Image (spheres, helix red, strand yellow):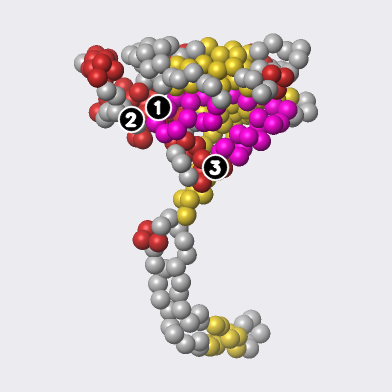
Amino acid sequence: MPSPFPGMNPYLEQEDAWRDFHEAFLPAAREAISPQVSPAYVVKLEQNLYIHERAADQRHLLGYGDVTVSRTGAADPHGAATAVLTAPSRILLPRVDVESESFLEIRDSKTRRLVTVIELLSPTNKRPGDDRQRYLAKRAGLLQSDAHFVELDLLRGWPRMPFDEAPTGDYCVLVSRVEDRPQAEFWPIGLRDRLPEIPIPLRNPHPDARLDLQAVLHRVYDAAYYRDYIYDGTPWPPLAGDDAAWARQLAAGEVA
């Protein structure tokens, strides 16, 4: 069965579900787009990589060695003794976490020239900090390039990306066409609104592809069996008032 919510399912915004949803949504979007653009274009799944160094209290000790340098004899194939140095001490190396996030590229099938980039935002992109700044730098580069740019924000949490005079909404979609910049198409989306069908711009003379975000969400929701576990938690950020009661009622009907 599809998601019980008419639009975005706020229970998918939980940390326990979001990463899996993100990594399932983009391949499903590719499957929806590829038949519309083949054979002129290829749709490729690429990855952003984020490397995080852990705090000092999360680093692991590698151990200690002797405090003096000693030489021990080790025989080589010719029978001569070879000196082996033992380090005087052991040090702590910073532990790093490597996080990857997928995005889509549409490229010309013959020249491999980049035509369109599709990003689905994650907390990594939206939380204030170095990762957001890196994403904003990438975004700024794309908005100055000769590639179209599509940005999907299906998270209520954290600050929005920078827009000038954008209407408010719980979620939003940006479609930036090369020929229209600095203007862009923008969809503000409410919690109870159906996710829109959006254009995916290509190069002339090819018409736009179409991406039905709601249909993709339902497909991913069914395939991943999210109904088996996401309703054990609560939407994040928490919903309030009538929205909270409305969401609980729909979730209760799904797990009944």
Mark drawn on residue 156: 1
Marks 2 and 1 in Cβ contact (< 8 Å)? yes
Residue at the location (52% across, 16% down)? Answer: 187
Q: Is residue 41 visible?
A: no
Q: Identity of the amino acid at label 1?
A: Arg
Distance, label 2 to label 3, CA atoms, is 22 Å
Q: Is 242 in front, or is 153?
A: 242
Report crowding for label 1: few under 14, some 14 to 19, many 20 or more residues within 10 A (C-alpha): many
Mark drawn on residue 178: none
Query: Which numbered disc, 1 or 3, marks the residue that appears first in the sequence?
Result: 3
Residue at the location (56% across, 25% down)? Answer: 164
Report crowding for label 3: few under 14, some 14 to 19, many 20 or more residues within 10 A (C-alpha): some
Is 152 magenta? The answer is: yes
Q: Is residue 210 visible?
A: yes
| Image quadrant in which you'd find residue 62 | bottom left
Q: What residue range appears in magenta? A: 135-163
Name the spot of residue 181 as percent of width and height, x first.
68, 22
**Residue topped by disc 3:** 133
Residue at the location (34% across, 35% down)? Answer: 16
Drawn side of residue 139 relative to residue 108, left or right: left
**Quadrant showing the N terminus:** top left
Q: Identity of the amino acid at label 3?
A: Gln
Name the spot of residue 143 as percent of width and height, x first.
66, 30
Q: Find numbered disc 1 in the image and state the secondary structure of the residue it sits on.
A: loop
